[in-house]
């Protein structure tokens, strides 16, 4: 497995994986194994690739996982992130207020079905965490309360901490944080 930053040539593979996991394309049974909420257009992926925020796993050149990480300035083009950013400075982690400077938003993360439960999850998280630690000390993310697989994976297995809960567009979310200087337990 190769872990790397995405380039233009990976965009089709990323879009294919996104289409298979986008909440609006799945039925209730399929959602049990997790889903991604934020739809990316080609241009949005291209912009994020330029910002060095698209982390991928390649198996024989096929994109089998991606993780998007970016500044709040990038994310606020989506209303939900604009909302999250609006109360960021009301939250404290390890005695520090969260700001646009000390935190970034991690996710969506997506792993092809065949590769779930294989350990790839921890490996790609670690790859992205180490890179983002060079830029920010605190990771912030959200998980829809009905995405139990993602909650188990991130909270029980990786140790992300719930910092608050919020509602947006009739969905209920956990908001979580993680110290990017900390390696996850293997
Ligand atoms: C979320 C995701 C990244 C996690 O990666 P993964 O390889 O599936 O994670 P793992 O299998 O290592 O861990 C998931 C854990 O949840 C458990 N689990 C699976 N389905 C579950 C469910 N419906 N309810 C509760 N726990 C569940 C698994 O048994 C596993 O625990 P275990 O290793 O102790 O058995 C991956 O499933 C994925 O890409 N899903 C689709 C997109 C998605 O949901 N992205 C996250 C958006 S916030």
Image (tube, rainbow, N blue to C red):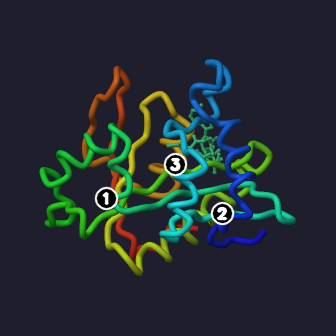
Q: Is residue 14 above or below residue 137?
A: above
Determine which residue is flagged by label 2.
56
Q: Is residue 59 above or below residue 3?
A: above
Foreground: disc 1 or disc 3: 1
Residue occupying the point 56% across, 65% down = 49
Give the spatial CA distance, label 1 vs label 2: 22 Å
**Which structural element holds mark 1?**
helix
Determine which residue is flagged by label 3.
108
Give the spatial CA distance, label 2 vs label 3: 12 Å
Image quadrant of ligand 1 equals top right
**Which structural element holds mark 3?**
strand
Callout 1 touching callout 2 (CB < 8 Å): no
Residue occupying the point 75% across, 72% down = 2
- N-terminal of the two: label 1 or label 3? 1
Determine which residue is flagged by label 1.
73
Q: Is residue 87 above or below residue 119?
A: above
Q: From the Cβ of disc 3, is ligand 1 less than 8 Å away?
A: yes
Residue 167 point in image, percent of width and height: 29, 29
* Closer to us: 102 or 116: 102
| Label 3: how many Cα within 10 Å (few below 14, some 14–19, many 20+) | some
């Amino acid at each position: 497995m190769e872990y790397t930053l995405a380039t233009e040539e990976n965009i089709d593979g990323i879009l294919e994986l996104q289409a298979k996991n986008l909440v609006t394309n799945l039925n209730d049974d399929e959602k049990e194994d997790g889903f991604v909420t934020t739809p990316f257009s080609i241009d949005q992926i291209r912009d994020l690739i330029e910002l060095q925020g698209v982390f991928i796993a390649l198996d024989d050149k096929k994109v089998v996982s991606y993780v998007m990480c970016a500044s709040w300035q990038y994310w606020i083009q989506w209303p939900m992130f604009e909302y999250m950013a609006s109360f960021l400075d009301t939250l404290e982690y390890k005695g520090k207020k969260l700001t646009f400077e000390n935190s970034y938003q991690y996710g969506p993360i997506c792993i092809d079905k065949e590769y779930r439960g294989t350990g790839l999850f921890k490996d790609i998280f670690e790859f992205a965490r180490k890179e983002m630690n060079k830029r920010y000390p605190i990771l912030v993310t959200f998980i829809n309360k009905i995405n139990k697989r993602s909650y188990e994976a991130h909270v029980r297995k990786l140790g992300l901490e719930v910092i608050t809960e919020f509602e947006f567009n009739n969905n209920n979310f956990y908001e979580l944080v993680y110290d990017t200087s900390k390696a996850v337990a293997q």
